[in-house]
Image: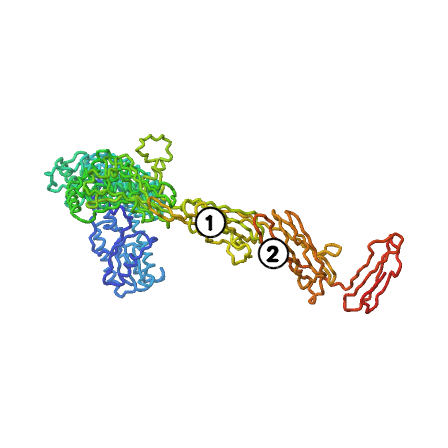
Amino acid sequence: MSPAQWDLPPELCCRPMAFVALTGLDVVYNAIHRAIWDAFCANRRADRVPISFKVLLGDHEYPKCRTKRTSYEWYIPKGILKTGWMNKHLNLVPALVVLFYELDWDDPQWKEKQSECATKVEIVRTSLQGRNTKVAVVLIQKKTPLPPGEDLVASERASALCGACDLSGKSLFVLPHTDHLVGYIIRLENAFYEHAQTYYYNEIRRVKSHKEFLNKTTHQVTRISAVNRNFYIAEFIYKDPHTFHVLSCRYYRTAYSLVHELRAHETNMLEIKTMAGFINYKICRLCFQHNTPLDAIAQFRKHIDLCKKKIGSAELAFEHTAWMSKQFQSFGDLFDEAIKLGLTAIQTQNPGFYYQQAAYYAQERKQQAGQLCSHEPGVVYPAPDPLETPSGALDFYGQRPWRQGHQSIDPPDSEKEKQGILALQVKERDVLHSELVIALLSNAVAQFKKYKCPRMKSHLMVQMGEEYYHAKDYTKALKLLDYVMCDYRTERWWSLLTSILCTALKCSYLMGQVKDYITYSMELMGRASILHEEQKSRIEKNLIKVLMNEVPQPEPDCDLTSVKTAQSLWSDRISLAGNNEFTIEVQDYVPFVQCKAKFLYPSFHIDEPVQLHVYVRADCPHPVRFSKLCVSLSNQEYNQYCLLEDTSKEKDILETSTQENMCLVPGKTRKYCFKFVAKTEDVGKKIEITSVGLMLGREMGRYVYLNWRGGWGDAASSHETLQASRSFKRRTRLPEQQLDWDTVTIQSSTMIISRVPKISVQLTHEPPALTNEMYCMIVTIQSEEDTVAKDIKLTAGLKPGQDASLTQSTQITVNGSEVCDDSHPALLPDISLGDLQPGQKIVKPLYIHCMSTGSRILLFHVAYSVSATVEGKDINCKCHKDETVTLETVVPFEVAMKFVSSKFEHLERVYVDIPFLLMMDILSASPWPIELVNSEVQLASSMTPIDQPQSQVEGVTLQTSECASECFLLKCPPVQNGTSTVASGHYFISWKRKSAFAETSVVRTIVILPHVMLENIPLYVHAELPSFGRVRESLPVRYHLENRTGLVQDVEIGVEPSDAFMFSGLKQPQGRNGDTSIEAA
């Protein structure tokens, strides 16, 4: 039975549109008629009325109308719905026939053309054969008509034409062929639609009038047919979506209830289910179209609950599951179509579930067909064919071809019934069920992928793979199964993975795919497989045969024809000389061999061998021997030292080897040790395990490399390691010879570090350092080596990576007598110290110049080379030792400067040619004694000394917080440019740290003297007073007044009285022009 039998009729799935036939148009040879036809049909927008147009001849023969019944008393219904009824009303019987006729109102041959038009109308009516189809006439005119009522000739002739054609005035239209043709066509369409609605309303009334003559007992089938036809015709009428939805759903639900009220038996069960499926489809589609998806889902669930037990004949049970599958598929299609139009679906309610259920019923159909249609070889298709009908099609939906129109419980002819059932079973046997299942599963997978349901997607892909396997399309089956196996390995669904692997193994065997067969065999033998030991043992034996380049035994439950083809393929594989080497990346699978490779320590010194351990464990039923074990490192030069190879050349990998440790015993862990001497140029570099390879088989035959990237781990190892680390179970104590696999940790990389230096480095100094001094630090290097330490080099200075300002303010030198400048580096590299004998000592003083305060880290790196023997190999080891020290730098002293008068009074400003004192206070801030060697003042040109300046602090030693002071008598000569602020000059202090530790050099510190305000006064007054006086004796006081300007000044002097003194002499002396000084006593 073809799958198309269960497809819904296209008339049911399409949107019903009013059928309007157009006659009188010659769309081939008449350009005007062609333009009119294009305006009707081309580029129809959604807002235009739903009409289906067809161009027919005027004498087209329409379906004949049945004779009207006047009584249904003795009428026996033959079925519910005729197969041609929907197509008849959609495409064959028009609601309106429109006659197009070229005729203008002022045509000179009006009478003749009027008569011709009436004749054509009569021909149309005759061809309709008594149907209620409406007839209308459209006059194609060249001129644009005048508004109604203005053209009296047109009104008269229109009335005459309507009378001649027996038409009402509403059935006559005028179509001017002008530039606005489309606008006129749209107006015509609306008028045509009204006429069509009138026709369909009349049809509904006519069908309803027949219902009055039917009784519920004998004419139940006819009543259902009448209701169905009414509701289908109603879809042609309603233009308003809301009204259409409400009424149509109500009517269709009524029809659905009536269908299920029919008494069901084996002879009419298929017809009832077919009609129920049609009506359910209509209800669900209407609900989706009007955005009520929950109503559609509820209706579908109700439909399935009512119909799922209506199986019918047990010998044709596969028909029921095929029908159920089609119901779910149709609903899934409706759901998906609604989503494309804007409906929102979710993970738990999407079309994928319905496609999945459809696939489930298709699979059940396949199983039932296998049980019911497996006839003996002598059974052939019956002749004559019971499925043939005289017309080539059924008269009623859901009926049997050999008993059409039969409505009684018992079949009319039991022999015909048997022959019909046999014909259906034979046809079902030829159906490609797997293709049906795969198509449905593919739809479901696409939906679950769209709605991000990965587990559902994987589950259905497994079913697709199995269907491809049953369909003998092993390539696609293997491709799908291999894709989903990754997910099941990751999520550790071992039982599901085992089942999938078994199917994949069969596919690879039947295709002759050697690598895939080896891979899946290894996985089915491993710890992830839940197969019994007997099954694992059989697979292991087959694997060994493949590695020995022999044909494996067939997998159980394989198709015999495919097995014969596979054996031929395997024989061809054996005869081929090449393609016998395979590499399996273990991290993607869970094979029966586990591996862990680790370095013994995270780092190794250059003077000791690097040790590497490889742990291998097998989980197969029987012992297995490998022929090669190799470790690949990041430096490939060491790979030659990490290789274990069986030197024997036996072909049989089960034969006893000369190296017993190359045999893996199931459940026991083998440890293989490798060691090698690292090269001196690898000091400071990391060596990593890039991969571990284990070879099964022989290079002379067929062999496979198991490759562990990083030296360990397969698809299940990470989770197993995590579980082992979290486990609180007490581990079983194993014998000393055996290793606990879970306790083996991973160390996949190691660092090669330099040999441990056997020298001592001591730093002797007196912190903190003082700013700008040449700070002495003595480095003492003593050898503790057993041999000569050669080519000793010292790198000393500021440790790299510190602030850039420290680099600019720090210099280092080996010569303490020279003054450091910017040309000296902050880090002095590779100071050669020569060789050092065992026990010998080298002392090296270094001088550090710090120009800023703060902390800085100093590095002292001592490098040398020494000869050593490792594993009988002489190497030259480079050793180094680093010492760091944090050096704090402080200021040695602080200098305070001030200007005072001759009476030591503080001066904010000084005056031209008037002496003043410059005071210097040196306050020690050093924790060590400071010796002031000398001091010197260097005056600016704006100041001159009154006497020769000499250092007053020379040779003074200052302890912490002690202060030394000195002063200089100065004066400022007149300034030419009138500057009010003048520079003072510089103050130089020569000092050094006073220490018994080492001879220190003198440091010269420069201090910039402050600027001072300078004022020019016009009159200078100076008093000469005796050092003491006696009571009641005269005290001579002399005042000197000096004019400092270039002009004559008039001066008036006044002396204020005092209670302690009596005055004599002039109290108000006056000066004269030209006098430069005045004296008063």
Q: Is residue 201 left or right of residue 1017?
A: left
The Cα atoms of the two marked residues, 2 and 1, are separated by 32 Å
Disc with the residue nearer the chain's start (2 vs 1): 1
* Circle 2 residues within 10 Å: few <14, some 14–19, many ≥20: some
Quarter of image, res 105: bottom left
Q: How is the image coloured?
A: rainbow
Using the image, determine if residue 418 lies above or below residue 920: above
Q: Secondary structure at mark 2?
A: strand
Q: Residue at x 37, y 50 (%)?
A: 681
- Residue, x 65% and y 56% (percent of image)? 935
Quick check: marks 2 and 1 in contact, CB under 8 Å? no
Is 373 rendered above or below residue 1032?
above
Q: Nearer the viewer, residue 322 or 487?
A: 487
Q: Is residue 188 visible?
A: yes
Amino acid on which disc 1 is placed: His
> Does the rendering let one see residue 206?
no
* 10 Å crowding of disc 1: few (<14), some (14-19), many (20+): some
Identify the image quadrant of the C terminus: bottom right
Residue occupied by mark 1? 861
* Residue 783 locus on image (x, y percent): 45, 46
As drawn, the label of residue 116 is: none
Locate residue 1013, reporting x and y percent: 70, 60
The residue tagged 2 is: 1004
Please provide percent x and percent y for residue 93: 24, 50
Q: Residue at x 23, y 57 (%)?
A: 120
Q: Position of residue 478 (x, y in %)?
A: 24, 44
Q: Quadrant of the N terminus?
A: top left
| SS class, disc 1 | strand
Q: Name the residue nearer the viewer: 1068 or 243.
A: 1068
Q: Nearer the viewer, residue 850 or 442?
A: 850
Q: Nearer the viewer, residue 685 or 241?
A: 685
The residue type indicated by label 2 comes to Arg
